[in-house]
Image (cartoon, rainbow, N blue to C red):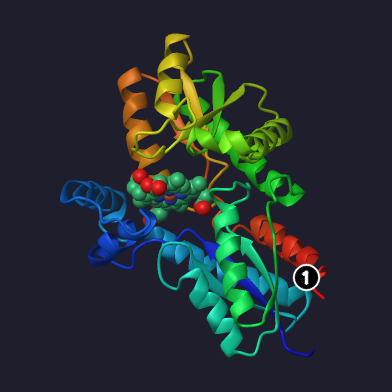
Amino acid sequence: SNAAIGVLVMSYGTPESLESVEEYYTHIRRGSAPSAEQLKELTDRYEAIAGGVFPLRENTDRQVSGLQDKLDTAEPGRFRCYQGLKHARPYIEDGVAAMAKDGVKRAVGIVLAPHYSTMSIASYNKRALAEAQKHGIELVCVESYHLHPSLIEALAERVREGVEAVSAKSGGADVKVLFSAHSLPERIREAGDPYEEQLLETSRAVAEAAGAPRWQFTWQSAGRTAEPWLGPDILETMDQLAGEGERALLAAPVGFVSDHLEVLYDLDIEAMDHADKLGVAFGRIRMLNSDPLYMETLADCIREAAAKLP
Ligand code: FEC
Protein backbone atom coordinates (compact mmCIF):
# COMPACT_ATOMS: atom_id res chain seq x y z
CA SER A 1 0.00 0.00 0.00
CA ASN A 2 0.99 3.65 -0.35
CA ALA A 3 0.27 4.59 3.27
CA ALA A 4 3.28 5.36 5.44
CA ILE A 5 4.64 2.62 7.67
CA GLY A 6 3.87 3.52 11.28
CA VAL A 7 6.73 3.60 13.78
CA LEU A 8 5.66 3.16 17.39
CA VAL A 9 8.45 4.71 19.47
CA MET A 10 8.05 3.45 23.04
CA SER A 11 9.56 4.95 26.16
CA TYR A 12 9.18 4.54 29.94
CA GLY A 13 7.16 7.72 30.44
CA THR A 14 7.18 10.32 33.19
CA PRO A 15 4.46 12.35 34.93
CA GLU A 16 3.09 15.43 33.17
CA SER A 17 3.15 17.47 36.38
CA LEU A 18 3.61 17.10 40.14
CA GLU A 19 -0.15 16.49 40.40
CA SER A 20 0.11 13.37 38.25
CA VAL A 21 2.97 11.70 40.17
CA GLU A 22 0.46 9.60 42.14
CA GLU A 23 -1.29 8.30 39.03
CA TYR A 24 2.08 7.49 37.46
CA TYR A 25 3.40 5.70 40.54
CA THR A 26 0.16 3.73 40.82
CA HIS A 27 0.55 2.63 37.19
CA ILE A 28 4.15 1.47 37.79
CA ARG A 29 2.88 -0.49 40.79
CA ARG A 30 0.28 -2.19 38.58
CA GLY A 31 -2.71 -0.42 40.06
CA SER A 32 -1.79 -0.40 43.73
CA ALA A 33 -1.56 3.16 45.04
CA PRO A 34 1.62 4.17 46.93
CA SER A 35 1.40 5.18 50.59
CA ALA A 36 1.53 8.90 51.40
CA GLU A 37 5.11 8.42 52.53
CA GLN A 38 6.18 6.65 49.32
CA LEU A 39 4.47 9.32 47.25
CA LYS A 40 6.23 12.11 49.11
CA GLU A 41 9.56 10.39 48.70
CA LEU A 42 9.16 10.12 44.91
CA THR A 43 7.80 13.68 44.61
CA ASP A 44 10.82 14.95 46.57
CA ARG A 45 13.14 13.21 44.12
CA TYR A 46 11.45 14.91 41.15
CA GLU A 47 11.70 18.23 42.96
CA ALA A 48 15.39 17.62 43.59
CA ILE A 49 16.31 16.91 39.97
CA ALA A 50 14.76 19.88 38.27
CA GLY A 51 12.46 21.72 40.64
CA GLY A 52 9.48 19.60 39.65
CA VAL A 53 9.89 19.46 35.89
CA PHE A 54 10.12 16.13 34.14
CA PRO A 55 13.08 16.11 31.75
CA LEU A 56 12.24 12.67 30.33
CA ARG A 57 9.13 14.06 28.63
CA GLU A 58 11.00 16.67 26.60
CA ASN A 59 13.85 14.24 25.90
CA THR A 60 11.48 11.59 24.55
CA ASP A 61 9.69 14.22 22.40
CA ARG A 62 13.06 15.29 20.95
CA GLN A 63 14.11 11.70 20.31
CA VAL A 64 10.89 10.99 18.42
CA SER A 65 11.22 14.11 16.25
CA GLY A 66 14.96 13.52 15.73
CA LEU A 67 14.19 9.99 14.59
CA GLN A 68 11.45 11.21 12.22
CA ASP A 69 13.97 13.63 10.66
CA LYS A 70 16.57 10.89 10.31
CA LEU A 71 14.08 8.54 8.62
CA ASP A 72 12.76 11.32 6.34
CA THR A 73 16.24 12.33 5.22
CA ALA A 74 16.91 8.83 3.91
CA GLU A 75 13.41 8.04 2.57
CA PRO A 76 10.97 10.97 2.60
CA GLY A 77 7.44 9.89 3.52
CA ARG A 78 8.13 6.17 4.02
CA PHE A 79 7.75 6.19 7.81
CA ARG A 80 5.58 8.09 10.28
CA CYS A 81 6.49 8.09 13.99
CA TYR A 82 4.04 7.85 16.92
CA GLN A 83 4.87 7.93 20.61
CA GLY A 84 3.68 5.32 23.12
CA LEU A 85 4.64 5.40 26.81
CA LYS A 86 4.71 2.52 29.26
CA HIS A 87 3.50 4.33 32.38
CA ALA A 88 2.09 7.70 31.27
CA ARG A 89 0.03 9.32 28.53
CA PRO A 90 0.14 8.86 25.60
CA TYR A 91 0.18 5.18 26.59
CA ILE A 92 1.45 2.49 24.21
CA GLU A 93 -2.20 1.71 23.38
CA ASP A 94 -2.89 5.39 22.61
CA GLY A 95 0.02 5.42 20.15
CA VAL A 96 -1.30 2.34 18.33
CA ALA A 97 -4.83 3.80 18.26
CA ALA A 98 -3.45 7.04 16.76
CA MET A 99 -1.80 5.02 13.97
CA ALA A 100 -5.05 3.18 13.29
CA LYS A 101 -6.92 6.48 13.10
CA ASP A 102 -4.46 7.67 10.44
CA GLY A 103 -5.08 4.53 8.39
CA VAL A 104 -1.74 2.85 9.15
CA LYS A 105 -1.84 -0.86 8.25
CA ARG A 106 1.80 -1.85 8.72
CA ALA A 107 4.06 -0.73 11.55
CA VAL A 108 7.31 -1.22 13.39
CA GLY A 109 7.74 -0.93 17.17
CA ILE A 110 10.93 0.08 18.95
CA VAL A 111 11.72 0.85 22.61
CA LEU A 112 14.09 3.62 23.72
CA ALA A 113 16.16 1.13 25.75
CA PRO A 114 18.85 -1.02 24.06
CA HIS A 115 18.77 -4.25 26.12
CA TYR A 116 16.13 -6.97 26.02
CA SER A 117 14.54 -8.35 29.14
CA THR A 118 11.32 -10.25 29.75
CA MET A 119 10.54 -7.60 32.39
CA SER A 120 11.29 -4.59 30.20
CA ILE A 121 11.21 -4.76 26.39
CA ALA A 122 8.99 -7.85 26.27
CA SER A 123 6.27 -6.11 28.26
CA TYR A 124 6.28 -3.05 25.98
CA ASN A 125 6.15 -5.20 22.85
CA LYS A 126 3.42 -7.44 24.23
CA ARG A 127 1.14 -4.47 24.88
CA ALA A 128 1.88 -2.97 21.46
CA LEU A 129 1.19 -6.25 19.65
CA ALA A 130 -2.08 -6.85 21.53
CA GLU A 131 -3.36 -3.38 20.63
CA ALA A 132 -2.17 -3.63 17.02
CA GLN A 133 -4.08 -6.87 16.63
CA LYS A 134 -7.29 -5.16 17.77
CA HIS A 135 -6.89 -2.60 15.00
CA GLY A 136 -5.78 -5.05 12.32
CA ILE A 137 -2.30 -3.51 12.09
CA GLU A 138 0.65 -5.73 11.12
CA LEU A 139 3.35 -4.88 13.68
CA VAL A 140 6.96 -6.08 13.87
CA CYS A 141 8.84 -5.15 17.05
CA VAL A 142 12.59 -4.63 17.47
CA GLU A 143 13.92 -6.62 20.45
CA SER A 144 17.34 -5.11 21.14
CA TYR A 145 20.15 -3.11 19.57
CA HIS A 146 22.79 -3.25 22.27
CA LEU A 147 25.71 -3.89 19.89
CA HIS A 148 24.77 -1.61 17.00
CA PRO A 149 28.05 -0.01 15.79
CA SER A 150 26.64 3.55 15.90
CA LEU A 151 25.42 3.03 19.47
CA ILE A 152 28.81 1.69 20.54
CA GLU A 153 30.58 4.59 18.83
CA ALA A 154 28.36 7.20 20.52
CA LEU A 155 28.88 5.60 23.95
CA ALA A 156 32.63 5.18 23.44
CA GLU A 157 32.97 8.86 22.58
CA ARG A 158 31.21 9.70 25.85
CA VAL A 159 33.38 7.33 27.89
CA ARG A 160 36.61 8.81 26.45
CA GLU A 161 35.43 12.32 27.22
CA GLY A 162 34.18 11.32 30.71
CA VAL A 163 37.42 9.55 31.64
CA GLU A 164 39.35 12.69 30.75
CA ALA A 165 37.05 14.93 32.78
CA VAL A 166 37.11 12.74 35.92
CA SER A 167 40.84 12.25 35.65
CA ALA A 168 41.33 16.04 35.47
CA LYS A 169 39.01 16.50 38.46
CA SER A 170 40.98 13.98 40.52
CA GLY A 171 44.31 15.59 39.72
CA GLY A 172 45.34 12.88 37.26
CA ALA A 173 44.23 9.62 38.94
CA ASP A 174 43.65 6.49 36.86
CA VAL A 175 39.88 6.34 36.23
CA LYS A 176 37.80 3.19 36.58
CA VAL A 177 34.63 3.02 34.47
CA LEU A 178 31.44 1.70 36.12
CA PHE A 179 28.99 0.56 33.47
CA SER A 180 25.51 0.37 34.94
CA ALA A 181 21.87 -0.38 34.22
CA HIS A 182 18.55 -0.61 36.05
CA SER A 183 18.51 -3.63 38.33
CA LEU A 184 15.72 -6.19 37.99
CA PRO A 185 14.50 -8.89 40.38
CA GLU A 186 16.89 -11.84 40.49
CA ARG A 187 14.12 -14.15 39.32
CA ILE A 188 14.71 -12.96 35.71
CA ARG A 189 17.62 -15.45 35.76
CA GLU A 190 15.30 -18.45 36.11
CA ALA A 191 14.05 -18.22 32.52
CA GLY A 192 17.48 -17.52 30.97
CA ASP A 193 16.80 -13.83 30.41
CA PRO A 194 19.43 -12.21 28.10
CA TYR A 195 19.45 -8.85 29.96
CA GLU A 196 22.67 -9.38 31.95
CA GLU A 197 24.61 -10.87 29.05
CA GLN A 198 23.56 -8.10 26.66
CA LEU A 199 24.62 -5.45 29.18
CA LEU A 200 28.02 -7.09 29.56
CA GLU A 201 28.38 -7.27 25.78
CA THR A 202 27.68 -3.55 25.44
CA SER A 203 30.09 -2.73 28.28
CA ARG A 204 32.88 -4.83 26.76
CA ALA A 205 32.42 -3.33 23.27
CA VAL A 206 32.30 0.25 24.57
CA ALA A 207 35.34 -0.21 26.83
CA GLU A 208 37.29 -1.63 23.93
CA ALA A 209 36.25 1.11 21.49
CA ALA A 210 37.00 3.80 24.09
CA GLY A 211 40.39 2.32 24.99
CA ALA A 212 39.30 2.04 28.64
CA PRO A 213 40.55 -1.32 29.92
CA ARG A 214 39.78 -0.58 33.59
CA TRP A 215 36.04 -1.16 33.99
CA GLN A 216 33.41 -3.23 35.70
CA PHE A 217 29.66 -3.63 35.52
CA THR A 218 27.35 -2.80 38.43
CA TRP A 219 23.59 -2.34 38.95
CA GLN A 220 21.66 0.74 40.02
CA SER A 221 18.14 1.92 40.96
CA ALA A 222 16.90 -1.41 42.36
CA GLY A 223 13.29 -1.41 43.54
CA ARG A 224 12.51 -1.32 47.22
CA THR A 225 10.64 -4.60 47.44
CA ALA A 226 11.09 -7.68 49.61
CA GLU A 227 12.38 -9.94 46.81
CA PRO A 228 16.09 -9.98 45.94
CA TRP A 229 17.26 -7.71 43.08
CA LEU A 230 20.37 -8.12 40.93
CA GLY A 231 23.45 -6.67 42.63
CA PRO A 232 25.87 -5.34 43.59
CA ASP A 233 24.39 -1.86 43.62
CA ILE A 234 26.60 1.00 42.45
CA LEU A 235 26.86 2.46 45.99
CA GLU A 236 28.23 -0.85 47.34
CA THR A 237 30.57 -1.12 44.37
CA MET A 238 31.86 2.38 45.12
CA ASP A 239 32.49 1.41 48.78
CA GLN A 240 34.43 -1.62 47.70
CA LEU A 241 36.51 0.20 45.10
CA ALA A 242 37.29 3.10 47.43
CA GLY A 243 38.44 0.49 49.96
CA GLU A 244 40.75 -0.97 47.33
CA GLY A 245 42.28 2.47 46.78
CA GLU A 246 40.48 3.64 43.62
CA ARG A 247 40.48 7.45 43.53
CA ALA A 248 38.42 8.25 40.41
CA LEU A 249 35.22 6.65 39.08
CA LEU A 250 33.14 7.32 35.97
CA ALA A 251 29.55 6.08 35.82
CA ALA A 252 28.46 4.95 32.36
CA PRO A 253 24.73 4.11 32.62
CA VAL A 254 24.53 2.27 29.29
CA GLY A 255 21.13 0.75 30.09
CA PHE A 256 19.53 4.20 29.78
CA VAL A 257 19.41 6.63 26.86
CA SER A 258 18.06 9.87 28.35
CA ASP A 259 18.53 12.33 31.14
CA HIS A 260 15.84 11.30 33.64
CA LEU A 261 15.24 10.52 37.30
CA GLU A 262 17.38 7.36 37.48
CA VAL A 263 20.37 9.27 36.12
CA LEU A 264 19.80 12.80 37.44
CA TYR A 265 18.90 11.63 40.95
CA ASP A 266 20.38 8.16 41.51
CA LEU A 267 23.75 9.03 39.95
CA ASP A 268 24.13 12.81 39.91
CA ILE A 269 22.78 13.37 43.41
CA GLU A 270 22.92 10.10 45.36
CA ALA A 271 26.08 8.51 43.94
CA MET A 272 27.83 11.88 43.71
CA ASP A 273 27.11 12.54 47.37
CA HIS A 274 28.37 9.06 48.23
CA ALA A 275 31.59 9.70 46.30
CA ASP A 276 32.13 12.94 48.20
CA LYS A 277 31.85 11.05 51.48
CA LEU A 278 34.33 8.44 50.23
CA GLY A 279 36.70 11.14 49.00
CA VAL A 280 36.61 9.73 45.46
CA ALA A 281 36.38 11.84 42.26
CA PHE A 282 33.17 10.93 40.42
CA GLY A 283 31.45 11.78 37.16
CA ARG A 284 29.10 10.27 34.62
CA ILE A 285 28.98 10.12 30.86
CA ARG A 286 26.67 12.45 28.93
CA MET A 287 23.44 10.68 28.03
CA LEU A 288 22.63 9.92 24.39
CA ASN A 289 19.34 11.89 24.27
CA SER A 290 18.90 12.79 20.58
CA ASP A 291 22.52 12.27 19.50
CA PRO A 292 22.65 11.71 15.71
CA LEU A 293 24.45 8.36 16.15
CA TYR A 294 21.66 7.14 18.42
CA MET A 295 19.05 8.33 15.92
CA GLU A 296 20.97 6.42 13.23
CA THR A 297 20.94 3.28 15.41
CA LEU A 298 17.16 3.47 15.78
CA ALA A 299 16.60 4.28 12.08
CA ASP A 300 18.69 1.26 11.01
CA CYS A 301 16.79 -1.11 13.30
CA ILE A 302 13.47 0.25 12.02
CA ARG A 303 14.43 -0.27 8.38
CA GLU A 304 15.59 -3.80 9.17
CA ALA A 305 12.33 -4.62 10.99
CA ALA A 306 10.24 -3.02 8.21
CA ALA A 307 11.84 -5.43 5.74
CA LYS A 308 10.12 -8.26 7.66
CA LEU A 309 6.62 -6.79 7.21
CA PRO A 310 4.32 -8.67 4.86
O1 FEC B 1 12.39 10.26 34.82
C1 FEC B 1 11.37 9.59 35.03
O2 FEC B 1 10.31 10.12 35.37
C2 FEC B 1 11.32 8.10 34.86
C3 FEC B 1 12.60 7.45 35.18
C4 FEC B 1 12.59 5.94 35.10
C5 FEC B 1 13.16 5.18 34.10
C6 FEC B 1 13.00 3.80 34.46
C7 FEC B 1 13.48 2.77 33.72
C8 FEC B 1 13.40 1.44 34.01
N1 FEC B 1 12.68 0.92 35.07
C9 FEC B 1 12.83 -0.44 35.05
C10 FEC B 1 12.26 -1.33 35.94
C11 FEC B 1 11.55 -0.99 37.06
C12 FEC B 1 10.95 -1.95 37.98
C13 FEC B 1 10.32 -1.23 38.97
C14 FEC B 1 10.52 0.16 38.68
C15 FEC B 1 10.04 1.23 39.45
C16 FEC B 1 10.22 2.57 39.14
C17 FEC B 1 9.71 3.68 39.95
C18 FEC B 1 10.09 4.86 39.31
C19 FEC B 1 10.82 4.47 38.11
N2 FEC B 1 10.86 3.10 38.04
FE1 FEC B 1 11.68 2.01 36.52
N3 FEC B 1 12.32 3.72 35.66
C20 FEC B 1 12.05 5.02 36.05
C21 FEC B 1 11.34 5.36 37.21
N4 FEC B 1 11.25 0.27 37.51
C22 FEC B 1 9.82 6.28 39.75
C23 FEC B 1 8.89 3.51 41.24
C24 FEC B 1 9.58 3.98 42.44
C25 FEC B 1 10.93 3.34 42.64
O3 FEC B 1 10.99 2.12 42.85
O4 FEC B 1 11.91 4.11 42.56
C26 FEC B 1 9.56 -1.81 40.16
C27 FEC B 1 8.10 -1.86 39.80
C28 FEC B 1 7.32 -2.69 40.78
O5 FEC B 1 7.14 -2.23 41.93
O6 FEC B 1 6.90 -3.77 40.38
C29 FEC B 1 11.03 -3.47 37.82
C30 FEC B 1 13.69 -0.81 33.92
C31 FEC B 1 14.04 0.35 33.28
C32 FEC B 1 14.98 0.51 32.05
C33 FEC B 1 14.35 0.04 30.78
C34 FEC B 1 13.26 0.96 30.31
O7 FEC B 1 13.50 2.18 30.14
O8 FEC B 1 12.17 0.43 30.11
C35 FEC B 1 14.10 -2.23 33.54
C36 FEC B 1 13.80 5.70 32.87
Q: Position of residue 175 (x, y in %)?
A: 55, 23
What residue sits 27% from the left and 49% below the top? 42
- Residue 20 lies in what quarter of the image? bottom left
Above or below, 284 relative to 44: above
160 left or right, relative to 89: right
Q: Residues within 10 Å of mark 1 (few under 14, many from 20)?
A: many
Furthest toward the left, the residue is 36
Q: Position of residue 156 (x, y in %)?
A: 66, 40
Q: Disc 1 beta carbon < 8 A from ligand 1? A: no
112 left or right, relative to 71: left
What residue sits 57% from the left and 76% below the top? 82
Which residue bears the numbered disc 1? 306
Between 240 and 87, the one lying in front of the other is 87
Q: In which quadrant is the N terminus drawn? A: bottom right
Kind of residue sitting beneath label 1:
Ala
- Residue 140 lies in what quarter of the image? bottom right
Between 18 and 98, the one lying in front of the other is 98
Q: Number of labelled discs? A: 1
224 left or right, relative to 286: left
Q: Position of residue 90 (x, y in %)?
A: 45, 73
Between 235 and 182, the one lying in front of the other is 182
Q: In which quadrant is the C terminus drawn? A: bottom right
Q: Position of residue 261 (x, y in %)?
A: 38, 49
- Residue 153 shows in this picture: yes
Q: Secondary structure at mark 1?
A: helix
- Residue 81 lies in what quarter of the image? bottom right
What residue sits 33% from the left and 61% below the top? 24
Above or below, 266 relative to 175: below
- Residue 81 shows in this picture: no
